[in-house]
Amino acid sequence: MKRINFINPFGTKAYDEIIWKTLSNYCSSDTELHVTHLENCPSDIDFFYSKHMIEQSLYEAVLKSEEAGYDAVIVGCLYDPGVRAARELVDIPIVGPLEASFQTASYFGHSTMVLTDHRKAVPYISDQARLNAQGETVRGVEAIDWFVKDMINDRSAVVRDVVERSKVAAERFGAETVILGCTIIAAIYQEHLMEGGAPSSIPIINPNLMALKIAEALADLYKNKAYFIARDGFYMKPSGHHEQEFRKARKIWNQSAIDFSK
Amino acid sequence: MKRINFINPFGTKAYDEIIWKTLSNYCSSDTELHVTHLENCPSDIDFFYSKHMIEQSLYEAVLKSEEAGYDAVIVGCLYDPGVRAARELVDIPIVGPLEASFQTASYFGHSTMVLTDHRKAVPYISDQARLNAQGETVRGVEAIDWFVKDMINDRSAVVRDVVERSKVAAERFGAETVILGCTIIAAIYQEHLMEGGAPSSIPIINPNLMALKIAEALADLYKNKAYFIARDGFYMKPSGHHEQEFRKARKIWNQSAIDFSK
Amino acid sequence: MKRINFINPFGTKAYDEIIWKTLSNYCSSDTELHVTHLENCPSDIDFFYSKHMIEQSLYEAVLKSEEAGYDAVIVGCLYDPGVRAARELVDIPIVGPLEASFQTASYFGHSTMVLTDHRKAVPYISDQARLNAQGETVRGVEAIDWFVKDMINDRSAVVRDVVERSKVAAERFGAETVILGCTIIAAIYQEHLMEGGAPSSIPIINPNLMALKIAEALADLYKNKAYFIARDGFYMKPSGHHEQEFRKARKIWNQSAIDFSK
Amino acid sequence: MKRINFINPFGTKAYDEIIWKTLSNYCSSDTELHVTHLENCPSDIDFFYSKHMIEQSLYEAVLKSEEAGYDAVIVGCLYDPGVRAARELVDIPIVGPLEASFQTASYFGHSTMVLTDHRKAVPYISDQARLNAQGETVRGVEAIDWFVKDMINDRSAVVRDVVERSKVAAERFGAETVILGCTIIAAIYQEHLMEGGAPSSIPIINPNLMALKIAEALADLYKNKAYFIARDGFYMKPSGHHEQEFRKARKIWNQSAIDFSK
Amino acid sequence: MKRINFINPFGTKAYDEIIWKTLSNYCSSDTELHVTHLENCPSDIDFFYSKHMIEQSLYEAVLKSEEAGYDAVIVGCLYDPGVRAARELVDIPIVGPLEASFQTASYFGHSTMVLTDHRKAVPYISDQARLNAQGETVRGVEAIDWFVKDMINDRSAVVRDVVERSKVAAERFGAETVILGCTIIAAIYQEHLMEGGAPSSIPIINPNLMALKIAEALADLYKNKAYFIARDGFYMKPSGHHEQEFRKARKIWNQSAIDFSK
Amino acid sequence: MKRINFINPFGTKAYDEIIWKTLSNYCSSDTELHVTHLENCPSDIDFFYSKHMIEQSLYEAVLKSEEAGYDAVIVGCLYDPGVRAARELVDIPIVGPLEASFQTASYFGHSTMVLTDHRKAVPYISDQARLNAQGETVRGVEAIDWFVKDMINDRSAVVRDVVERSKVAAERFGAETVILGCTIIAAIYQEHLMEGGAPSSIPIINPNLMALKIAEALADLYKNKAYFIARDGFYMKPSGHHEQEFRKARKIWNQSAIDFSK
């Protein structure tokens, strides 16, 4: 049995249910999936200041996930917030849904694009494509211009926008498939499909599913001692003086009563 | 239970055992893995003429795999021979180990490179990196200059070369990890590890494992009706007149008594 | 006198006449041009399965061309089917019209694009641009959405679509010229010009002409012992055991009575 | 008079003096330069966890700089830590020395590279080059393998390594100049020059100077109402609900007694 | 006091006043700015033949600027005419407004594009972006289709076109800001702003200002002996025989009575 | 009969003979090749100031070549000096040997590199590769560090350096072939071959031959009314006021007695 923690990097439980509802059905038979959220941090990740505070909470949640015996962690937001820094901290695999979608998109079509929530995320996701060294197969990024906090309350409007905008955007960029660039949009659309709704005419990639399947794959390898991460460069862990500084800082953080979610 | 066919795209059974030996151990608990090879085709894939004939046999094997109820196929050679064309033919996912390794390398280190068998494969694999739109994270390709048919008979020399050349090549290209660019090299190295041999100082990615885990991930999605491939562009299937021509050609091929393996 | 074989890679003579009609006029004075087609293979190359069978026949035709004393071969389809693999087999130059058009486009304008026949070919040709390491001067690829087999029967409609769509596509992509991405479209358009038809307002590059002129150039060098191809990497020829395997496989192929054109 | 705050993003005053000493001499005549450091955060930024905590303190320092009437801020570390996120928060220009060096390198030579402190920073800086969309003029990144905290105590060894390694690295990558990829290395080397030491045979770019001159340029524009930043995309500021959440979170952070520097 | 020569690379004084009017206001307090033009050369630079003759005059003006004690030169045209060659000739910094705008655009928004005068300049400026190794942050180039000589006489029409076309172009290319790709367009638009005109809804970058601020920055460094240019590669100066040849050719040029401006 | 003018862009007849000797042998049977040089301009093109003056003379020579009925012009230097600007002036095809070599290199091997004369040319040729949008198939540029004027007097040393340095450089960059990045080096090496000298172990591409064959190809098309260049963008010709200015400036240039070759 492999244990996976899908962390919603938001200081609210508002999104846990829909993620669980639209993801648990697709687990491998020996996967124990938990959907959790963060404590003491802002509820919205859209702006960089709150994203930074959320990441601080996320690091602790990731460290605790490893201590609790999880075999992999998914950071459930298309910003892939804190994903790379988290790999410095733990030896279990850390998966971001955007990276996972970029990696698996080639099985769904020759080229892809990302349709995200808000226009602030468009350049951010373009940068992530560049950072992940995605080349010409990721053709563009566009937004439906919703903030996450509003979407959950008007799901049918979100589905309608996804279906309409995917078609237009895929044509604009010459992409064969569309990655939904927000875990909540993706969950709402998946719920729509699970309830028998008509699919988009453009094939749509659900990043939550991609993250889940990649996390399962790496969790298997981790349990079989076949997962590891190069520790002599980017993902070097602190040692000696630097390790002590890390332990001290983590302790101070945990002892503080700081709570941004109030 | 998901059923996966790992096809050795060679007209010989010589490599089936070592692939099985070094791969079956890493399957998910509900995976039924078969390791098979091709019939009636050349035994070596190194040169393009024989590769082409092997691919012709592969297409038939892939079509029969779908008919036999497999949920995914792995084409077991780092040329990823026939992988894209095969996706035109069937609806089950088709996985190539090179593409799968490019996709998962980011979990093992910040950058990677490929160490392949023979120098003819070096530019070929560079082209595949370009075709797969891999950017700067794949830093280079180099060869240990062995042909596959010779490696199987001198395994310890292969292991020695892998360990030595990985170190030099990773330094040359500034790569944090090394993908072994040949399924047989990878299997020999994995056997060495499984027998307690010392690992390379540079983290090494086994493409067979990567292909297996991606195939399992996609097979799960396929069984859950969540795998599909865009059919309106590159992977369009023939219809009408073109479908009839396809069926006729396939029938003629199967009725011919042609056997390149004699 | 240099001898050039323009092979229509189709199992039909249907396109030989129009190619001859629109190409022979532009030969150098000492060129002996032959326009031929393949035997025993499918008539349409649009789908990858039939393309693969066509390429198998093509390799034999290329080998026979060298044996017959040709100084260069043109493979007359914008897929450039089998062009690279064919270079493994013979020492005479092998020219594909897409590659030749990419190479010469800079003499016709600052940037270019490709207007091809069917939408399945759009991502294929984009990939070829990437494989040929064409950079930003090839601005995009678009299709007029015809299959080759239909075009030959409605030539004026093809010309009309070429003229209209070139203008729209060049504007969309910011390209100064348009390469016609199909030898038959190109021949139909050239026939239209030769019959006094009005040219497109956007300068159009005929890939057949580009292939012819590059083939003549290389044929001259070949006859002067100044053409050669690096044999220590991608274009390495089989030797020893591998050469025997090649000869055996070729013999088996030629002895088989296989005929996909029936 | 334009006022510039050069913030050493370290929870220590250890580096303030050498930065002041090697930078103040190069100010424009109407520049009031302050060199400051952060409070309550870790002293070393090398690892990502401590970098994250430092950035949290940095945001507050940047906000306070704007409130205090500074016309520009320099974040004095070649990680360019928090530079982009800080631009979300304030309207004064925020300058990172790595970005500034990339931008001005073309005036010092045709191509450049970065020579940084520790090997963990090598892939990080490569990523920054990619994020800043630097193309082929930045040829590579290499490290002298020192941690910042050790350098300050052995300055002559640092200078020796800079001179020797610059020459070797520039030759390896074919670069005409070398950007010192650490503000402290750069200050130590500048001090060496100011004390009459012999310069490197390869022209060396001091990122502190580049950041200073870019900050002055932008501060002039800011004071003349000619500096602004596009607020409708990546640098959108929170408004409405999101602005309230930002204000609340900032207040909570400031009220907490958290101090990672203990 | 730093002295900067902004050279209008046109054989006419027609543009000196508007450049001075819209630039002098933004100088640093210790900058002595001169706006000059060329003698004896064509008045329009749009076409390559006249541009070449203008560059010949420019080199002499640049050499004389150094002899006259200027600390930096700006070549005031978005072609950045002769900028690189001029760096071979003198040790003072030479600044082109296009290069300076590319370099500073990141402070104004996440991505940019260029809106230039005439369509002939569009591919030219695309090439400059490539030569300057600008990556994906420069999203495109477009023209308002005016020749410089006409703009000066119909300023309000130019402003109207800038405002309208910037919006459309930025949306087309997904750019957050627009660089005005012609010094005269930029001056006309700046004049409009200085006279209280409404700004474009898309943030606009004035290349003249960017060139000025970069020139001031480098002039400061030059006066402080901290500016230099690598002389062992692209910017190598002639020595020995080659230096004599340069001196002789310059003398001949200066002694000739040639005057293209007649 | 097609007439081609190979212009040595040097103010000396010193190189005409060796170019003729090593090129005329490879002409097509209906080619009338002339090898000429420029008058009244500097003899060496290595530095940018003299290159600019040479280009001024070249434009006149190109204009006169068209008037004299040539069907194509080759500008015989690997700087491809003035090639693009010359296309603004005339309707006959203008060929540069570097561009021609980039375009035809794929027929000689999978990848290539340039080995040029002097180190100042290395970044220049890298830029040309970028301007010509050459991608990853051009792997690098290196120099043998000779100036052209010295080579002609010590030909055997040049050959020795070519053979030795090609091998080392090709290995360094992973290139399968080497383009000689200077017409004179190439001619000296070709002379060596023609006199029975041993060839380099790395296949070498002679840019003079490539330019000749491309020029012949385009000259054929030109004579057949099938060559044209897009005149609505980069290669727009001056008309109206601008055409008058061009004619006036050309006349002034021709009437001046200026002679840089004295």
Image (cartoon, coloured by chain):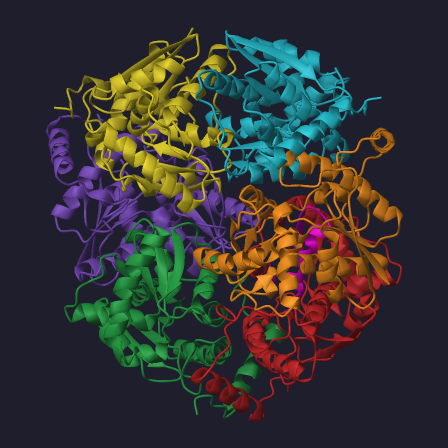
Chain colours: A orange, B red, C green, D cyan, E yellow, F purple
Which residue sits at x=57%, y=55%?
Answer: A158
Along the viewing direction, whichever of F71 and C131 lies nearer the viewer: C131
Where residue D54 appears, as percent x and y from the top left, is 73, 27
Residue E56 in the figure: left or right of residue E4? left
Check the image and report above or below for C135 versus C65. Answer: above
Residue D215 in the figure: left or right of residue F15? right
Residue C232 in the figure: left or right of residue E44? right
Where residue C30 appears, as percent x and y from the top left, is 23, 69
Residue A84 lies in the magenta stretch: no
Which image quadrant: the C terminus of chain F?
A: top left
Residue E25 in the figure: left or right of residue A177? left
Check the image and report above or below for F43 versus C246. Answer: above
Asked whether residue B119 appears in the rendered view, the answer is: no
Which residue sits at x=28%, y=68%?
Answer: C161
Which residue sits at x=12%, y=24%?
Answer: E262
Check the image and report above or below for C205 versus B107. Answer: below
Where residue A75 appears, as percent x and y from the top left, is 73, 49
Check the image and report above or below for C139 versus A260. Answer: below
Residue B98 lies in the magenta stretch: yes
Along the viewing direction, whichever of B235 and D147 lies nearer the viewer: B235
Along the viewing direction, whichever of C133 and E124 lies nearer the viewer: E124
Figure label count? 0
Identify the image quadrant of residue B73. bottom right
Residue at the limit of the structure toward the front, as seen here: A153
- Magenta segment boundaries in residue numbering: B95-122
Asked whether residue F124 appears in the rendered view, the answer is: yes
Where residue F112 appears, as percent x and y from the top left, is 48, 52
Which image quadrant: the N terminus of chain F?
A: bottom left
